[in-house]
Amino acid sequence: MALLERCFADMLNSGFSPHAVEATIQYRKEAIGDLQAIASMTTEEQKFIRASLQTRKRANFAVEVQIVDKNGSITSTMQVKWMVLPDCA
């Protein structure tokens, strides 16, 4: 959600709401200690989503997330599928 707020704050503040519709996780190794989730989205992906919101008033997309431990090792990966829709009145 933090990634969506960072990339699309203007759209979210102008009447669109994100909804997580599906999530999958793959565990790679035992996770011990503090963990950090890292997600990113390319400029091209952001442009595509913005265009979809402007033309179709909705967008469907997936965000890849890596969960890393304090040593920087990837302990798991996750994919969250999002749908962004206009707010209900």
Image (cartoon, rainbow, N blue to C red):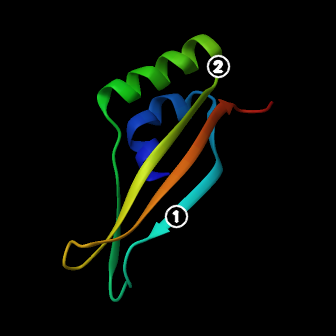
Residue 20 in the image: state x and y as whole percent: 63, 49
Judged left or right of residue 57, residue 31 is left
Can you name the residue that lies furthest to the left here? 71
**In front of the other: 77 or 49:** 77
Task: Pinpoint residue 53: horizontal percent, then vertical percent.
Answer: 57, 21
Of marks 1 and 2, which one's residue comes earlier in the chain? 1
Place residue 15 in its image quadrant. top right
Q: Dot 2 lies on which element?
A: loop
Q: Residue at x 23, y 79 (%)?
A: 70
Q: Nearer the viewer, mark 1 or mark 2?
A: 1
* Residue type of the residue flagged with mark 2: Lys
Residue annotated with mark 2: 57
* Residue for point 51% across, 41% down: 62
Q: How far across and how far down the image is residue 39, in percent?
A: 36, 52
The disc placed on residue 52 is none
In the drawing, does residue 50 fall left or right of residue 37?
right
Q: In the picture, which quadrant includes the C terminus?
A: top right
Residue 7 in the figure: left or right of residue 55: left
Q: Quadrant of residue 86?
A: top right
Mark 1 is surrounded, within 10 Å at the Cα level, by few (under 14), some (14 to 19) or many (20 or more) other residues, namely: some
Pointer 1 residue: 25
